[in-house]
Amino acid sequence: MTLRKLAFIALANLFVFTSCTDDNDDIYVTPRGDYENGLLISHEGNFFGGNASVSYVSGDLNTVENNVFENVNGSLLGDTAQSMAFNGDFAYIIVNVSNKIEVVNRYTFVSVATINTGINNPRYMTFANGKGYVSNWGDGSVASDDYIAEIDLTTNLVVSTISVTEGPEQIVAQNNTIYVSHKGGFNSNNKVSVIDALNTNSVIEVTVNDNPDELAFDVSGNLYVLSEGQTLYDSNWNVIGHTLGAISKINTVTNTFESSIEFANEAHPTQFNIEGSKAYYYLNGSVYSMDLSDTTLPTTATISDLSFYDMTVKNGLILGVDAKDFASNGELQVYNATSGSLLNTVEVGIIPGEIYFN
């Protein structure tokens, strides 16, 4: 069996394809749009190039459409697509340098609204208590102006802001509680903010290792935080030391730090995913996997010789994007999460940054 056939079989498990019902072969599930049942990949594009984009890749990897937003709406997306978030039938595309959020129907990609007031250096978005919440760095040279923008999802307007510590990055929600990692923006930080979205939008902070970034919940609802650690420099930009990266666990009942596993000195992990009882992270061109119950880090990589700019793990597959030379088209790569074997590669757009299932 060819690798392409293996990839199709594996990926078919990830998507619900249009099909007839068991009771009546004449009744079909109506597709909601051309971009249902596949992958959406956001692309940063070149900094200040105005060529941010979104690509669609079908579930069988046989169809790729780049520049979906432009193709559907007849206009460019903007400068630096940082991330996307999904709520109901809508996708929210956070366009960082353009300081806006483009709202589209996630299945047709028809534009619904543009949110460009009350947004300043936006990063990531989540949803809680019927509202949207967006992390904003504000002015990168000012440490005290960072905030979470609260968005009315009916009017698509920013209705309030929540002041937070410097460099809010990833943002996730569970049971109307919001968790924000503070990587530090153009500086460094070591906090995770916990926001009560149901009542007062009050903020408490949990201290972890330096440069917390990726956030993921396990099946029990505990929050895991990947901290990259910090490289320290002198005034002439010579490296003088490192702080330790870590995988930390936060108890989401008490919203307190519970435990952590630290990385070796000079190791700065990125990209963290949880699937079932296993965690996956990326370090120095390799993907490592471990059981969440482990108390030490693995010593052997699952896949090596990679150049991932982002990755995600789902249904036994590791999907990563390679930005190549950051000027020409990048690549989506699909691997078996157990064996580490490469199943398929697909060419996508310029600087692919995030992978989403639609």
Image (cartoon, helix red, strand yellow):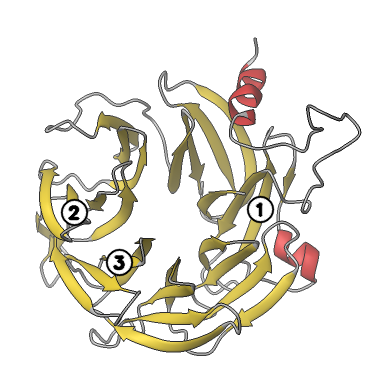
Q: Please, what secondary structure does the residue beneath circle 1 have?
A: strand
Asked if residue 328 shows in the view, the reply is no
Q: Amino acid at mark 2?
A: Ile
Q: Which residue is mark 3?
A: 180
Residue 90: which quarter of the image?
bottom right
In this view, the residue in front, 182 or 33, is 33
Q: CA distance from mark 2 to mark 1?
A: 34 Å
Q: Earlier in the sequence, mark 2 or mark 3?
A: 3
Residue 263: which quarter of the image?
top left
In the image: residue 162, left or right of residue 103 = left
In the image: residue 95, left or right of residue 184 = right
Crowd rating for badge 2 (residues with CA inside 10 Å; few <14, some 14–19, many 20+): many
Q: CA distance from mark 2 to mark 3?
A: 12 Å
Disc ID at residue 55: 1
Q: Which residue is mark 2?
A: 250
In this view, the residue in front, 300 or 126, is 126
